[in-house]
Amino acid sequence: MINYKIPLLGITAYSGTGKTTLLKRLIPELLTMDIRCGLIKHSHHNMDIDKPGKDSYELRKAGAAQTIVACDQRWALMTETPSQAVNLSELAAQFNAELIDLVLVEGFKHEPIDKIALFRSSVGKPFEGLIDSDVIAVATDDNLALNIPKLDINDPSTIAEFIKRWLKDRN
């Protein structure tokens, strides 16, 4: 397992299980516990956060390898990677450890980081294909017999408490 400057915790599941829905509820719960979160979300689709016609888009398309778009409330760094796959280590290194305590990772399911697996039998995919040696807990609404902690997928406060303990145990 790679040792990152900021702890990384994967949220892994089959498409349609509710990863983003859970994260939208989980992040505010973690904030109430004074756990500041960063997020890395992997997309299997070509995505662009910039808009055609905007100066930043046009300058990036003109050949800038990296572009920062900034205002007083936020900034974003866009890096072109046409000939290489994205690398979780490089992405995680972009975070400022003074601003966050934890990076939640949605996607990158084959990376060797601790993960909470989400499972709903209603999605119609096998449970066995979801679990690997890095899964530290399963969040589900199914009645499963497990050798690792089972969390209620519909109770983000319980999942947040688990993450808080996990973070404390890492220190």
Image (cartoon, rainbow, N blue to C red):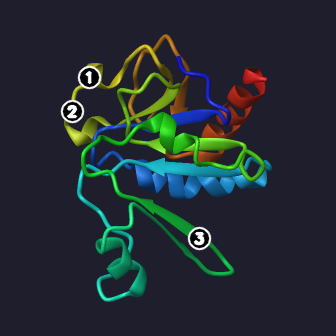
The answer for how far apart the CA atoms under marks 2 and 3 are is: 38 Å
| Quarter location, residue 123 | top left
For the C terminus, the image quarter is top right
The answer for how far apart the CA atoms under marks 2 and 1 are is: 8 Å
Residue type of the residue flagged with mark 2: Lys
In the current view of this chain or complex, which residue is farthest to the bottom? Answer: 53
Residue drawn at (45%, 37%) of the image: 88
Instruction: Verify CB contact (< 8 Å) between mark 2 and mark 1.
Output: yes
Residue type of the residue flagged with mark 1: Gly
Which percent across, then down, holds residue 99?
A: 74, 53
The answer for how far apart the CA atoms under marks 1 and 3 are is: 38 Å
Residue drawn at (78%, 49%) of the image: 98
Choose the circle earlier in sequence order: 1 or 3: 3
Vertical side of 131 occupied by 85: above or below:
below
Instruction: Give the mark count.
Output: 3
Which percent across, then down, holds residue 104?
A: 55, 43
Q: Which of 122 and 86 is in front in this view?
A: 86
In the picture of the structure, the residue carrying the numbered disc 2 is: 125
Label at residue 146: none
Quick one: SS at disc 1? helix
In the picture of the structure, the residue carrying the numbered disc 3 is: 75
